[in-house]
Amino acid sequence: MKKISVCKLAFIFLIVSFCFLHLVAANETCDTIGQYGPALATSVISTEGYGQLSLLQTIHVYWLWVLHLCIVVILLVLYILYIRRYNKMLKQEVAERRIMEQKLEQYAAELKHSNEMKDLFTDILRHDLLNPAGVVKGYADLLLEMETDIKKLQYLKNVSRSNQKLMDLIEDAASYTKLDTIGNLPLEKMDLKGIITNVIDSMILQISEKHAKVSFSSSGTYPAKVNPLVEQVFVNFLSNSLKYGPYSANIDINIVDAGDSWKVCFADEGEGIPEYSKQAIFERFTRLKAGAIKGSGLGLAIAQRIVELHGGKLGVTDNPKGTGSVFWASFSKA
């Protein structure tokens, strides 16, 4: 369409320019007659002189028209060459886009297969590995009740403890794998105070074993937009405070008003975390140096993922009251 339009315009331009130049030539001829007519009429060569002047002027004008024609032809040729080159580049771009589309389709298929394999891995973790570990736990607990030899009891306790760590690791790995595939969580209005109270009640046995004192300062309600999975974040914070804190330690839990969000803080009296390790503890399967929290880091990685799905923030600071750390997470108000 563009080619045809340009050609039509060029043709119209040639016709108009030809007519215009022809009129100019005729006008100049008339001027010549008006200027030399009386003198030429009395001369023998008047007709020849007039003819010579008109012919020269006409030839000059038509040479200009031919020049116009050559310029237009050259422009048309250049335009056609440009169109051919543009079409070639366009075809090449279309071919490259088709190749990219094929690669994207292949990548999407591989990603879908990868997600399917991840789901399969999660199922294997939860069933094929967790079930045998549960059987080992059952027999170990039974033998612990029956055995009276102190040395054998120590062996059985080590087996039971290691097996429990294995089960916890399987559960954490399965939970993290599942959370990693979730794009968003359905949120609902819930009271953070009630969630934290339930967490404390569910871990009363672990609290009593460490002779810890858990203080939860709260008044009123703290409505937030959260998912029930948020309970795992508070379980992880309290579990770490108990696991890595000293006996008879104090654990202070507070909810701070942070404007548009609630900031939940768990302050412990443990050894504390070095500044260079405060970000690393939230990475998967990270073991820190001596003097800091040791472990796989899956629990905190799961907590961080849950908080991210809530659109909140999570971090750790030094305990301003002395030794220890303060783990905190923020959630939007409802």
Image (tube, rainbow, N blue to C red):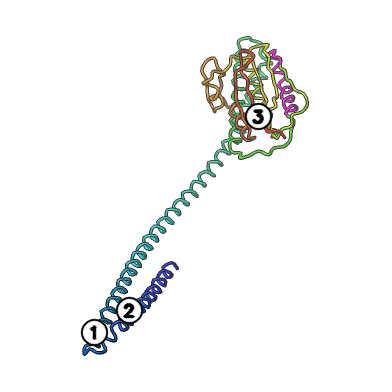
Q: Which amino acid, by three-letter code, is at mark 3?
A: Ser
Residue 314, image x and y in percent?
A: 61, 28
Looking at marks 1 and 2 on the same chain, the residue that comes earlier in the sequence is marked by: 2
Q: Are marks 1 and 2 in contact (CB under 8 Å)?
A: no
Give, as a single range, the part of the protein colored magenta: 192-213
Could you tell me if residue 229 is visible in this image?
no
Where residue 28 sits, quadrant-wise, is bottom left
What's the residue at 28%, 83% (across, down)?
A: 36
Q: Which residue in the structure is indicated by mark 3?
A: 330
User: What's the distance in space between the residues labelled 1 and 2, CA to CA?
Assistant: 15 Å
Could you tell me if residue 68 is visible in this image?
yes
Foreground label between 3 and 2: 2
For the N terminus, which image quadrant?
Answer: bottom left
User: Along the line of sight, which residue is nearer the eye, 168 or 252?
Assistant: 252
Q: Which residue in the structure is indicated by mark 1?
A: 49
Judging from the image, what secondary structure is the residue with disc 1 in? helix
Q: Which amino acid, by three-letter code, is at mark 1?
A: Gly
Left or right, 74 with reference to 165: left
Magenta region, mostly helix, strand or loop?
helix
Density class for disc 2 (Cα within 10 Å; few <14, some 14-19, many ≥20) is some
What's the residue at 40%, 61% (across, down)?
A: 87
Q: Does the magenta stretch include residue 195?
A: yes
For the C terminus, which image quadrant?
Answer: top right
User: What's the distance in space between the residues labelled 3 and 2, CA to CA?
Assistant: 91 Å
